[in-house]
Amino acid sequence: MIERIETNQRMSKIVKHNGVVYLCGQVGIAEDSVAEQTRECLRRVEDLLAKAGSSPSKILQAIVWLADMEDFAEMNAVWDNWVPEGYAPARACGEAKLARPELKVEMIVTAAYDA
Amino acid sequence: MIERIETNQRMSKIVKHNGVVYLCGQVGIAEDSVAEQTRECLRRVEDLLAKAGSSPSKILQAIVWLADMEDFAEMNAVWDNWVPEGYAPARACGEAKLARPELKVEMIVTAAYDA
Amino acid sequence: MIERIETNQRMSKIVKHNGVVYLCGQVGIAEDSVAEQTRECLRRVEDLLAKAGSSPSKILQAIVWLADMEDFAEMNAVWDNWVPEGYAPARACGEAKLARPELKVEMIVTAAYDA
């Protein structure tokens, strides 16, 4: 009924249930620029969605946390280029400091998958 | 399988899937008071839910971001008055700066719709 | 179609729909340490999940807000010990001030239940 992939004691990177896949919060590499962190974050999202039998065109909701809202435009430039045209999810973006001070962006992605 | 309404390159205002509708983060008008921003935000939520075949009595979860937690009581006064009696959703409220410094409140709404 | 439990004018502690239960944001007791707040928060989550016909082994997604990211390790120590081995949910953790200044941790939990 619930399928978990890449599970450790703290979290599962992927949880599938009833046609919906929940990814754990994805980040990039801490030392990079916000643009590169966003690119790496989205690469990881894409990889996890593939493992879940989903894809970027099936994202339902994305919640974006930026450590500094000043990075909004730079993050969006990468995001807008990445989203498959016509398949943009519902999205919200707020400012929140992240688990390590060098992390600039985190995304919480929920998507559909083919059952 | 996934229906999107009011989609641009960045986000869809409405995404419907499997009986659940995800709205993109809704805000009010940046220059207004928190009470008026909350009222306008909820007007927009109501409008989007109607377009999605849902309604305020079918909200499952609302995540509220306040730019300043000092506005908690003022936001709640509007919210409590707006929620249809007996139909309140699960809710959480945390402090997060928003996309523009004048924005005081944002709501991330997930609701049911009649399939 | 939607079942609400412990509903007041502002929120429902539990909302069930289509196999998924949404809990309202759970906190601990404001005066306590972050470890004890996390323990109490998770006790409340466990209690609400039981009332919803769910359990900690059926959590799909947990969004954790810490008022101060310095508390990350202390919160995680309690969390890691609480999660049933092999059943960890998708998780994300960001910094957000909470409804009262003494509150250190809040969790937004979504879980599956047996229909």
Image (cartoon, coloured by chain):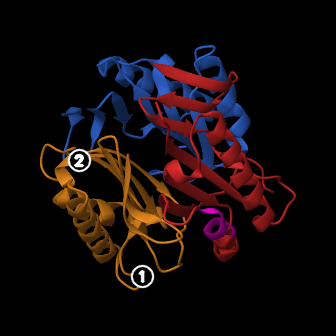
Chain colours: A orange, B blue, C red
Please determine if labels 2 and 1 lie on a single subunit: yes
Dot 2 lies on which element?
Answer: loop
Residue stretch in magenta: C78-83
- Dot 2 amino acid type: Tyr
Measuring 54% from the left and 25% from the top, which residue is drawn there?
B39
> Residue C81's quadrant in the figure?
bottom right
Residue neighbourhood size for the residue with mark 1, other residues' Cα within 10 Å, grouped as few (<14), some (14–19), many (≥20): some
Q: Residue at x 61, y 58 (%)?
A: C65
- Residue located beneath label 1 in the image: A30
Left or right, A49 with respect to B72, comes to left
Q: Position of residue C104 (x, y in %)?
A: 73, 60
Please say whether residue B33 is visible from this viewpoint: no
Prevailing secondary structure class for the magenta stretch in the rendered image: helix
**Quick one: label 2 or label 1, which is nearer the N terminus?**
1
Q: Residue at x 62, y 29 (%)?
A: B35
The picture places residue C111, in percent across and down from the top left corner, at 50, 44
The percent position of residue B81, horizontal first and vertical second, equals: 65, 18
Is residue B76 located in the magenta-colored stretch of the structure? no
Q: Are marks 2 and 1 in contact (CB under 8 Å)?
A: no
Residue type, label 1:
Ala
Q: Chain of mark 2?
A: A
| Left or right: where B18 falls relative to B29 | left
Q: Secondary structure at mark 1?
A: loop
Q: Is residue C2 left or right of residue C7?
A: left
Q: Which mark is residue A113?
A: 2
> How far apart, in angstroms, are the residues tagged by discs 2 and 1?
30 Å
Answer whether residue B9 is visible to the viewer in this image.
yes
| Chain under callout 1 | A
Q: Nearer the viewer, residue A93 or B98?
A: A93
Q: Nearer the viewer, residue C60 or A46?
A: C60
